[in-house]
């Protein structure tokens, strides 16, 4: 249900995709900032537009588990 988890997942994998890997906290912070800036606006828009479907699924499940 929480669309930010998708974004966190993308950011979590960003340091692993860098070569060389970030070695200092400053390098890691820079990598995460760069990755955040590289997220496609269309992805963020799609996540926002999915909220009505997510809420409807939650209501249909009466608060139970959903695919989101």
Image (tube, helix red, strand yellow):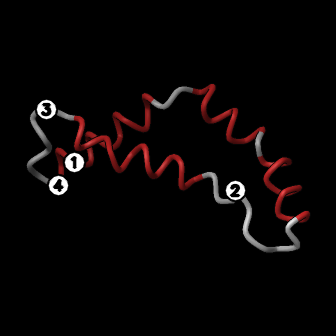
- The disc, 1 or 3, on the residue closer to the chain's N-terminal end is 3
Dot 1: element = helix
Circle 4: is it few (<14), some (14-19), or many (20+) Cα within 10 Å?
few
The quarter holding residue 42 reads: top right
Mark 1 = which residue? 28
**Cα distance between the residues tagged 2 and 4:** 35 Å
Q: Which residue is mark 2?
A: 67
Q: Residue at x 69, y 33 (%)?
A: 45
Name the front one of labels 2 and 3. 2
Mark 1 neighbour class, 10 Å CA radius: few under 14, some 14 to 19, many 20 or more: some
Who comes first in sequence, dot 2 or dot 4?
A: 4
- Tag 1 near tag 4, CB within 8 Å: yes
Q: Between label 2 and label 4, give the one nearer the viewer.
A: 2
66 relative to 61 in the view: left or right? left
Between the C-alphas of marks 1 and 2, the distance is 32 Å
In the image, residue 16 lies at what x, y percent?
Answer: 22, 43
In space, the residues marked 1 and 3 are separated at their CA atoms by: 12 Å
Q: Helix, strand, or loop for circle 3?
A: loop
Tell me the quadrant of the picture where the C terminus can be found.
bottom right
- Evaluate if marks 3 and 4 touch, with contact meaning CB atoms under 8 Å apart: no
Q: Which residue is mark 4?
A: 25
């Amino acid at each position: 249900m929480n669309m930010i988890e998708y974004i966190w997942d993308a950011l979590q994998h960003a340091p692993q995709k860098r070569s060389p890997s970030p070695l200092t906290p400053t390098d890691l912070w820079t990598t995460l900032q760069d990755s955040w800036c590289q997220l496609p606006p269309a992805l963020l828009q799609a996540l926002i537009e999915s909220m009505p479907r997510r809420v409807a699924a939650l209501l249909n499940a009466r608060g139970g588990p959903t695919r989101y």
